[in-house]
Image (cartoon, rainbow, N blue to C red):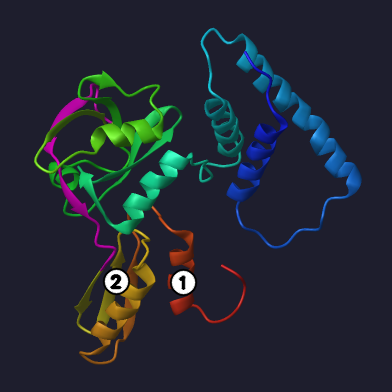
Amino acid sequence: MYPIRRSWILAVVATVLAAAPVRAAAPEPDAAARDELYQRLKVLAEVLDAVGRNYVEPVSADDLVYGAAEGIVSRLDPHSSFLSPEMFREMQIETEGTFGGIGIEVTVRDGRLVVVSPIEDTPAARAGIRAGDVIVRIENERVKGLDLSEAVKRMRGPRGTRLTIHVLREGWDEPREFTLTRDVIRIKSVRHRRIGDVGVIRIAQFQQRTHREVRDALSTLGEAGPLAGLVLDLRNDPGGLLDQAVKVADIFLVEGPVV
């Protein structure tokens, strides 16, 4: 079909480096180590070229490069993942805090679509969807083989429309059907309450304004008098924006090692 261009290989390498976990600065690799890395990249180039030329159906350059990047990053650890431009846009929508859907955070684990967390006060949460549930069908279509962005797109939709999903849960012999009515999902990142002289701050997800909302919650809690203690509730928080998590940590931690 076509040769694999060097620019595609560089795109894969750049993507993997950008997705790598942030760590303390490491020594620069010596010339011999760099040469060995570039030699090993020839294997990747040969695989991409062979697939592009010989696969039974045409494969786009984006599918080849993004697929290679996804495979490389997913082998690092369960918490590292590659986001294509479309998936990244979806993540931005969620972290802005408003979208139409049923109200669940999902991921793909071992080829299965798994619920990371139902979002509080949404159709999914009210219907009893739980973290760890496996979605096997969306509107009677099997989920297996769908990438994450496509699965999310199928569950999104205008407020008032209905969606049927089939869910398998640990301890169930067969999947069970849930029919939900989509709503405008507004994720309230931070909730707070006071129990006597103890404050409780619940973070549902790390969004663009989370650290400001945590500061506001602390101020509000303190208006009723000094606090003897504070509980920071992160249960079922699926994550979100790393910089917000770091800024929240900065509120409570004294200066010291990098978070």
Q: Is 42 left, or right, of 90 in this rendering?
A: right
Tell me where residue 73 sits by quadrant.
top right
**Residues marked 1 and 2 touching at CB (< 8 Å):** no
Label 1 Cα crowd, 10 Å radius (few <14 / some 14-19 / many 20+): some
In terms of secondary structure, where does tag 2 sit?
Answer: strand
Label 2 Cα crowd, 10 Å radius (few <14 / some 14-19 / many 20+): many
Q: Which residue is mark 2?
A: 201
Q: Is 181 left, or right, of 214 in this rendering?
A: left
Q: Position of residue 149 (x, y in %)?
A: 38, 35
- For the N terminus, the image quarter is top right
Query: Bounds of the magenta span?
Result: 171-190
Furthest toward the bottom, the residue is: 225
Q: Can see residue 169?
A: no
**Residue at the (65%, 17%) spot, across then down:** 2
Q: Position of residue 143 (x, y in %)?
A: 32, 24
Residue 170 is labelled as none
Q: Can see residue 68?
A: yes
Q: Which residue is mark 1?
A: 247
Q: Say above or below: 29 vs 41.
A: below
Q: Position of residue 224 (x, y in %)?
A: 20, 90
